[in-house]
Amino acid sequence: MLIDNTLFLRERFPEIREYFREYEKEIESERITVLDSKTRVKTIRYESEDNKHFMVHSMYDPMKEAERIISSHKGKITEDTHVFFYGIGMGYHIELFHELFPDNSYSLYEPISEIFLAMTEVRKLEYLVTKKAQNLYIDTHIAIYNDYLEEFYTSNKKIHIIYLPSYENLIKGKIISFNQRVKDAVQSRRISLSTKTSFQKLWVMNSLLNFKEVLNTPNMLRDIDRKQFAGKPAVIVSAGPSLAEDIEHLRYIKDNNLAYLFAVGSAINSLIEYDVFPDAVCTYDPGSNNHQVYKKMIDKKIDTIPMLFGSSVGYETIKNYDGPKVHFITSQDRTSTYFLKEQLDVEQDLIIDSPSIAVMTFQVLNKLGASPIVFAGQNLGYLHDRRYSEGINYDFIKSEVSEQEMEKAITTKDVYGNDIKTNIGFNSMRVGLESFAKLYNGNYINTTKGGALIEGVPFKPIENVIEEILTKPIEKINWWKAQNDYDYSVIETQRESLKKSNNQYQDLMRQLKKVIHSISNHTKSRSKSNVSISLTQFDGLYNKLLDNSYYQNFLSFYIRVYVEFLGNEIRRLNREPDMFVKGEEIVRLFSNFMRECEQESLELEKLISSSLEEVISK
């Protein structure tokens, strides 16, 4: 490696320099031969593991080849595009890109460390890794390398990938794996963004409006006697289309007290239709339609079934139900975690927000020690062109799957090994169940005929489960009859602390406005020293804002999509070498951000005030 490159990496990418310093002798450099092309420009010949030879660049004219590569992508690059180069090689195409698009940011990823090392022995990195290069990733031979995925999870810009064409022959398997990981990352981000956009305000609003009910009901994981569930079988009854086939088996289980029945979400409607009353109904959806799921139960004046609710559930759901209620605290509920403070054991008492109530209930039952945990009606896919079991019909969502939905459907394996159609939502629920099954490593059974295969939850028909496992009745008493022991004095202390924190927040915003105004003036006058001073002041105030309790626990969650967007931009600007560009961007971003904060904080403060008045007046 050239000494200039060693110094360059030590300064900008020390972890890459450290990797090559430590493992340089173990890298198979004999696979690489640097040659002169016909135009006397350096090229690389690569020998694969099966002794085949491939040219990384043209043997005739690598520069002409670089022009063709960039020319084929020109139409897809706008001023806001961030380019991700897969394959550096000698970097000719990267140099040309920077010449043609000097204002665009880009990242470099070299999946073959031997090629990168060979290049650094004959070319200076500073020509390729300019100030516009945000990241440099080098695949290592010591572990599976996924660091580059962070860009696809967090970048606010459109990312365009440019592959070095020869790599499709050199490392076809690696490219397939890379494409799948990027696809999964982008899809995961889209789902996350869609969820947060839909529910960011509802999570905060519901948690505040439900706090009074949380204080008036027992906590499932703190106040309920665990002996009533530990070592006892529990069936999570979901609303999949297979449920109708198992109704009589579930009736038999209930009538003979062979297990607890926990009806999750819409399953209660199918059970009620067949006069099977579960031991609990479970709910957590923050959406405004969630209360409609329980309309049939309420209209029939069924008020003896305990409702196990997540604390950030749609507030109308628990407001409308007069029967017994028990709560669990969700990870989306910042109201309870703030006001109850040390009274909650975060690891034990918090249920991590998940794609479905079945996944949430699965966590609860694992923490209670129920065993085995059995799934019924958990199709996680389409069966007979239906998403829900018979007896479940809503105005806001059809039980039957439309032709358009079937066209967009994805494929997964069912419990018999056949392909079935599903959707992204069901698929994420399956992944959620699999991750918690792996985490808790308990005794689980999936009885859903024709349902999606759930790794870690083996399939067994419900008839066999009854015959072989659920053979003895269990004792069931009124398990939900308990009192919580939350300390109201702590709540009052936290309330006063929040008032103080809100005042500090208002003061911080006034100071930030002044600093943003200063940065704006100094960037316009091109006063580098004053911009530097103002940016340092900004950093200090921004960090104080992040630590402010009101902002940290309430406002930042109320506008979390904007906050995450801003956080991504701040991280990007931390790598911006041009102080004036950084200053201009900070002014633009924070002027918009402060307007958003001002508007949404007014709404939020009223909500907090009215909700806490109800709690205090209890």
Image (spheres, helix red, strand yellow):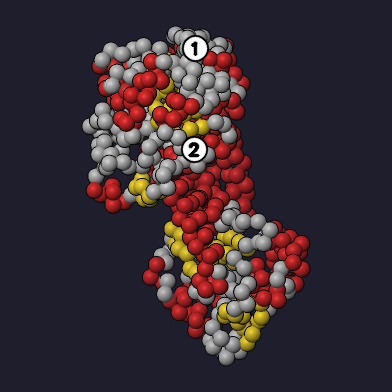
Q: Residue furthest front?
A: 467
Give how far across and how far down residue 610 sits, in percent.
41, 18
Q: Is residue 311 above or below residue 7?
A: above
Give how far across and how far down residue 72 sits, in percent.
42, 75
Q: Is residue 428 left or right of residue 484?
A: left
Give how far across and how far down residue 399 sits, in percent.
26, 36
Amino acid found under the numbered disc labelled 2 = Pro
- Which residue is rendered at x = 55% and y = 13% of the image? 225
Amino acid found under the numbered disc labelled 1 = Glu
Q: Is residue 169 left or right of residue 592?
A: right
Label 1 neighbour load within 10 Å: few <14, some 14-19, many 20+: few
The disc placed on residue 458 is 2
Label 2 neighbour load within 10 Å: few <14, some 14-19, many 20+: some
Quadrant of the rendered image containing residue 315: top left
Of 496 and 67, which appears nearest the observer?
67
SS for callout 1: loop
User: What is the distance, in whole Å, between disc 1 and disc 2 at their CAs?
Assistant: 27 Å
SS for callout 2: loop
Q: Please name the residue that numbered disc 1 is placed on.
A: 475
Of 453 and 79, which appears nearest the observer?
453
Q: Pick the quarter of the image with the C terminus.
A: top left
- Which residue is rendered at x = 60% and y = 39% of the image? 543
Q: Is residue 53 above or below residue 401?
A: below
Q: Is residue 348 above or below residue 200?
A: above
Q: Pick the quarter of the image with the N terminus.
A: bottom right
